[in-house]
Amino acid sequence: MQIPVTRESLPKAAGLVVAAVAGGAVAIAGAAILDVGKNTTTVREVVLDRPTFSGNVSQAGSQRMTLREIYRRDAPGVVQVTSTTKVKLPRSQWFGNPFGLEGTDVQRSLGSGFVIDKAGLVVTNYHVVGSAQTVYVSFSNSDSMRAEIVGRDASTDVALLKVIASSRALTPLPLGDSDTVEVGDEVAAIGNPLGYERSITLGIVSALHRSLTSPGGAPIDRVIQTDAVLNRGNSGGPLLNAQGEVIGVSSAIATGAGTGNTGIGFAIPINTVRDVVAQLKTSGHVEHPYFGVVSRPISSRIARVFNLGAPKGLLVETVYRGSGAEQAGLVGGSDPVVLAGESYQLGGDLIVRVDGVPVSTTERLREIVAQHEPGDTVLVDFYRGSELRTTNVKLGRQSPPPLE
């Protein structure tokens, strides 16, 4: 499955190819879902008895572990996830469907996951499970058992599984705090790259606050970027800090012009996953609030050239029908203009504050909205021309994508 990304988020570096996980108005170029079964490049193995992680300020407050210690403690809690999906075959006169009748085929995908409690709950990626009819989980002792799908959320690429196993057979991984992660922190990833079970790789946090498009098309914000080697099959595995705590879930890679790892991988922050898992445990699905606009940030130069009401803010280009934004009277642009090769849709409102908080990026708007629930109301300050206005937007409910 491949998910489109948008122009606004494309890195400036050459050689990246748009290839999957990411969505919405801001996304990452070249992010590819980490499935197996396609041609990929090499896997870098890490020597497990490397002495220790070198010092990082943000990680210095807790007991540090060697890579060997991290692997010995956490690898038993990392599982291999195999999902099976039946798909319809189109009518065809060619071999494989010789009678021209509709049939079915079985597709299997392989990924990773990790145990989070003694009750048998396992976290993995949505795109590992997808619309699978059956899912099996394999443990480090080679035990394989069928897993129940507790819930899945395409908007954050998170799925929650449950296995019935003895508590002694389960090794829950400790969850960290992704909000404390800093660029330069060393991290380790454990997973099943290319089907090689429970491999560990070492890297650093190379950037923060990236944005990916989920399989459901919604943006995932605050994504962690790492150069720890990830390949197809790592999906759903843990990204660990120097204390062996999970700070992210491996989800995507930048593929460049090929299909393998280029040294840029992405992990969904564990704080996001923690919130999603809480809702999946309760109801089996997640309700995401919906604001209802497509907007783009503007600079002071753009504001001056177009004579906008404020030097910073979000220019509303589109307002979706039936959304809370439309009902609140927000207006989108209707006058396309090109400036220095960039297209703008002028004539719409300029949002400057939401709930009293200044907004100058789409990520900031999404973060504010994400703190609410569907049905909540947010106060929006915006300029229409040179006039500052205020309105209340009632947040809707983001519709989940249909299972394939």
Image (cartoon, grey):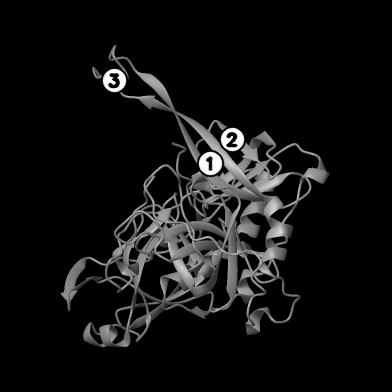
Q: Are marks 1 and 3 in contact (CB under 8 Å)?
A: no
Q: Nearer the viewer, residue 34 or 369?
A: 34
Q: With 353 as the anchor, is 200 left or right in this view?
A: right
Residue at mark 1 to residue at mark 2: CA–CA distance: 7 Å
Where disc 2 sits, the SS reads strand
Q: Is residue 327 visible?
A: no
The disc at residue 129 is 1
Picture quadrant of residue 330: bottom left
Q: Amino acid at mark 1?
A: Val
Residue at mark 1 to residue at mark 3: CA–CA distance: 27 Å
Residue at mark 2 to residue at mark 3: CA–CA distance: 28 Å
Q: Amino acid at mark 2?
A: Val
The residue pinned by badge 3 equals 91
Q: Are marks 1 and 2 in contact (CB under 8 Å)?
A: yes
Measured as percent of width and height from the top left, residue 262 is found at 39, 64
Q: Is residue 152 visible?
A: yes
> In this rendering, which labeled residue sits more in front, label 2 or label 3?
2
Where disc 3 sits, the SS reads loop
Measured as percent of width and height from the top left, residue 277 is found at 65, 52
Q: Nearer the viewer, residue 272 or 378?
A: 272
